[in-house]
Amino acid sequence: MRVSNIFLSIDGEVNIYHQGVFTVFVRLAGCNLKCSYCDTSYSRDSNSGTDMDIDKVVHKIESFGCKKVTITGGEPMMQSASVLGLTRILWEKGYKLSIETNGTSPLVGFNVDCWVVDYKLSNSGIEKQIDNDIYRKLHPTDFVKFVLGNKNDYKEALAIKKTLQKTGCCAVFAFSPMHKVLDPSQLVSWLKKDKVFDCVINLQLHKYIWPNCGEGEER
């Protein structure tokens, strides 16, 4: 596996085990997208990071003594075969697992408790075909996350949310205001006014706890 870093911290974003829970992050290197608001650009390059055998990754995870693991990137599903092998081993060892992904690859066949799947709005600045079938197959324990910077992003997210729900998506929808760009209280106000109560607000908790932590620094 091409690994950017492995470290112990708290989950700063939504997942079935809640924000703030201690977790071992396995951040894999390489991403197939280049979003305008990316806050982990250091891990986008597939040539960055370090090559590690899966057994060594498992050994590093076990050294922290924490039974929750978050696999992220970059885009972890670019290394889907390795992720499949890693999740099978961790699952057998009794770990709680969540994976954060951009939703451009199939998510079937993995031993995962929770998928956190981004839905790229126009503000991402990328061009890609959205496969709604990926979102339709998500479970109530999974999350679809929208990153919002302004009112137009919010309106776009509402329309997409409605469409996904009509196609059978039963995941939890998370509205994530860009840190220091969109005031969370403004987002809550819009949701209250529009009576959008079947969603959650996703604040990047780690950015509030460690506001001076630079990109790529372990927190």
Image (tube, rainbow, N blue to C red):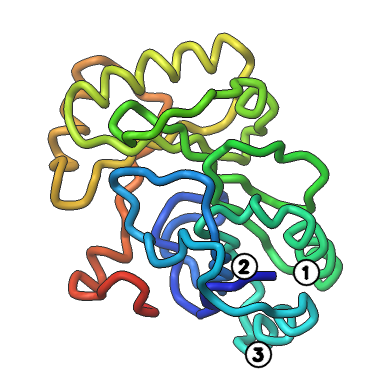
Q: Which mark is residue 119?
A: none
Q: Which mark is residue 63?
A: 3
Horizontal relation, residue 149 to residue 52: left or right: left
Amino acid residing under circle 2: Val
Amino acid residing under circle 1: Leu
Q: Quadrant of residue 24?
A: bottom right
Pointer 1 residue? 90
Sooner in the amino-acid sequence: mark 1 or mark 2: 2
Residue at 45 percent of width and 13 percent of height: 162
Q: Position of residue 8 (x, y in %)?
A: 50, 79
Residue at 57 percent of width and 37 percent of height: 103
Residue at 79 percent of width and 56 percent of height: 81
- Where 13 falls versus 123 (above or below)? below
Sooner in the amino-acid sequence: mark 1 or mark 3: 3
Local packing at callout 1 (Cα closer than 10 Å; few below 14, some 14-19, many 20+) is many
Local packing at callout 3 (Cα closer than 10 Å; few below 14, some 14-19, many 20+) is few
Amino acid residing under circle 3: Ser
Disc 1, disc 2: CB below 8 Å?
yes
Horizontal relation, residue 201 to residue 110: left or right: left
Pointer 2 residue? 69
